Image (tube, grey):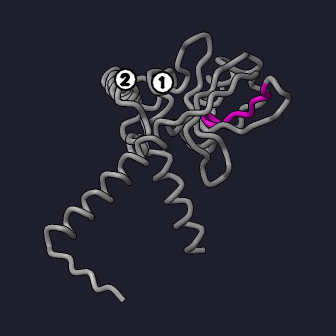
Amino acid sequence: MYIVEFNAAALRYIFLSLILILGLCLEISSSYAKVFRGDVTRIADGDTISVLLEDDTNIKVRLAGIDTPELDQPYGLEARDQLVQLVLGQPITCVCTKRDRYERWVCRVSFEDIDVNWMLVRDGLAWWYRYYQKEQPEEDRMRYEDAEMKAKDERIGLWSDESPVPPWEWRRQRREKQNRQ
C-alpha cells in the first residue's frame, strides 16, 4: 500500500488542470453544430417549426437565441404569422447546437442566407433571449442585442406596448395562477 502525500501547491495544480481540461471539453462541445437542410412544413408558433429534411425525416426546431410571445399573448399571433410569411414551404438551413428538454433541435434558421431568428428580433416580434446568450457566437449576440435595442428605440412591434411582458414571465405568471386555483 502506497501513501501519497500532496501539498497544497500540488493539489492546486491538479485542480486547475482539471478545470482547464473541462473548459476545453465544454468549448469543443459548444462549438459543435449539426446542419440540416429541408423545407418548413409547419409553424407551431413564433419560434417553433417543423422541417422535412432531404432524407424525408421530420424534425422539430426551436429557433435559437430568441423567445417570441405566446400565441395567447399580445404579438404572439403576429410573430407566428411573420414566420409563416418568411419560411413556410421554403427551403431553409438549420445550424443546430443542441436539443432542448422537449427534444426539439435548437437552431439558427436561415432562408436565402438571411438569419430568420434575427429578423424576428429586428421586427420587434421576439426578445433576444439573454438567458441563453452564452450558447450563441459572440457575433450573433452583438447583432441580436443591437436589433432588439433598435426595435425598442423605434417602438416596433411588441415594443410599441408601454411595458411588454416577456414570454418567460407570461408563462411563469400563468403557472402561478394555475397553482393558486
How far is mark 2 from mark 1, CA to CA? 8 Å
Query: Image point 15% across, 75% down: which residue?
Result: 7
Mark 2 packing: few (<14 Cα in 10 Å), some, or many (20+)? some
Mark 1 packing: few (<14 Cα in 10 Å), some, or many (20+)? many
Is the residue 160 above or below the residue 26 in the image?
A: above
Q: Disc number at residue 143? A: 2
Query: Image point 78% across, 27% down: which residue?
Result: 53
Q: Regarding mark 1 in the picture, which secondary structure is present there?
A: helix
Is the residue 123 above or below the residue 47 in the image?
A: above
Q: Disc number at residue 118? A: 1
Q: Amino acid at mark 2?
A: Arg
Image quadrant assignment for residue 135: top left
- Specify the quadrant that holds the N terminus: bottom left
x, y percent for residue 117:
53, 27
Marks 2 and 1, the one that precedes in the sequence: 1
Q: Which residues are magenta?
A: 45-53
Left or right? Give the position of 39 relative to 33: right
Q: Which is nearer the eye, 109 or 169? A: 109
Query: Image point 30% across, 52% down: which residue?
Result: 20
